[in-house]
Image: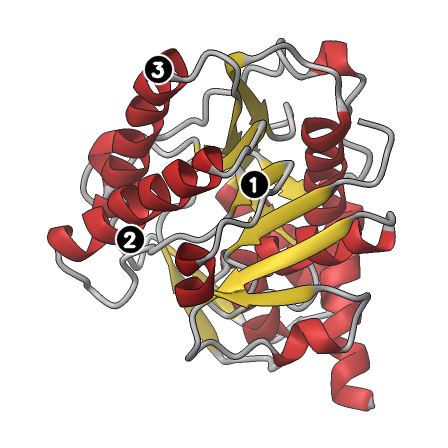
């Protein structure tokens, strides 16, 4: 798709959704941000032009969109019930998708996770929605469904719930100590700019209808212990004691991410930002905000 297209983005008050909406708007596309009336959308008003559309108006109108990018998610961080997670991560996006398709939608891009299903209610409900997309795609053969399985992405201005952001703030504050697990888990970290470059492809690539799945990640796996120690060095911190092993691994912890980029690489995507460079940008952004 080289022409300007009309794109609906959910989850625009979150880190990923906001960046996707603003990037596509800068590229000249017509972008509409779907949000709840109670949501704080002030961050979108300072960037490129993005049209705001509340959920109630979306379902009451029959407005056509070329592409729907789904980024909204309930991560279960406030100990929401399984029923609430099912509603937010399965039933609600199904309703949004069904309405958009009835209005002429041709491409759906779903933001998924690589987390194993057993790990949390969030991972289970995301997997349930992924499975429902296979059935939905079979019932709508003209629809292009792109399922994007994201590894741990990070970048400046993310919330404190992000591991990298939280740790960077703790290290810059030179906390006396930080309690951590042994840190032997090997993970892939992907910088937000590389994630956005992948979404550019999912929006613009001439792909045939049907269901297809892509993993967006770095193939380089880092032990979390090494990541933390690297961040401490980049932050210039010689004070904080890193207490590896002070915390147990979470129940069902998986020790190594499984990365397969064989579907995405033929589309011309490669991660460009190394972990060290990405961490420098996060730390630099936090330092700049403190100094401003």
Residue 250 in sight: no
Q: Residues within 10 Å of mark 1 (few under 14, many from 20)?
A: many
Q: Residues within 10 Å of mark 3 (few under 14, many from 20)?
A: few
Residue on which the image places disc 2: 88
Q: CA distance from mark 1 to mark 2?
A: 17 Å
Q: Earlier in the sequence, mark 2 or mark 3?
A: 2
Looking at the picture, tell me which residue is in the foreground, 211 or 271.
211
Q: In this picture, is 85 found above or below 47?
A: above
Asked whether the residues under the numbered discs 1 and 2 touch, taking CB atoms below 8 Å apart as contact, a structural biologist would say no
Looking at the picture, tell me which residue is in the foreground, 145 or 77.
145
Residue 163: horizontal and vertical position, in percent? 49, 58
Residue at 55%, 15% in the rendered image: 260
Element type where label 1 sits in the image:
strand
Element type where label 3 sits in the image:
helix
- Image mark for residue 68: 1
- Image mark for residue 139: 3
Element type where label 2 sits in the image:
helix
């Amino acid at each position: 798709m080289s022409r300007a297209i009309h794109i609906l983005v959910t989850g625009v008050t979150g880190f990923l959704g906001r960046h996707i909406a603003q990037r596509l708007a800068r590229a000249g596309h017509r972008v509409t941000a779907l949000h709840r009336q109670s949501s704080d959308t002030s961050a979108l008003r300072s960037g490129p032009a993005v049209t705001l559309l509340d959920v109630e108006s979306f379902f009451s109108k029959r407005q056509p969109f070329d592409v729907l990018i789904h980024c909204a998610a309930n991560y279960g961080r406030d100990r929401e019930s399984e029923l609430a997670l099912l509603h937010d991560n399965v039933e609600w996006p199904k309703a949004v998708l069904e309405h958009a398709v009835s209005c002429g939608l041709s491409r759906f891009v779903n933001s998924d996770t690589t987390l194993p299903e057993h790990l949390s209610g969030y991972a289970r409900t995301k997997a349930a929605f992924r499975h429902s997309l296979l059935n939905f795609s079979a019932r709508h053969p003209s629809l292009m469904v792109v399922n994007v399985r994201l590894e741990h992405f990070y970048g400046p201005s993310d919330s404190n719930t992000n591991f990298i952001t939280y740790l960077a703030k703790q290290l810059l504050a030179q906390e006396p100590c930080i309690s951590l697990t042994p840190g032997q888990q090997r993970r892939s970290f992907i910088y937000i700019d590389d994630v956005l470059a992948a979404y550019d492809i999912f929006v613009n690539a001439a792909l045939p209808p049907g269901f297809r799945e892509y993993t967006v990640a770095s193939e380089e796996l880092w032990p979390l212990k090494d990541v933390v120690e690297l961040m401490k060095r980049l932050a210039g911190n010689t004070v904080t004691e890193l207490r590896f092993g002070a915390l147990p691994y979470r129940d069902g912890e998986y020790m190594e991410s499984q990365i397969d980029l064989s579907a995405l690489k033929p589309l011309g995507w490669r991660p460009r930002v190394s972990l060290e460079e990405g961490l420098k940008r996060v730390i630099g952004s936090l330092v700049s905000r403190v100094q401003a």
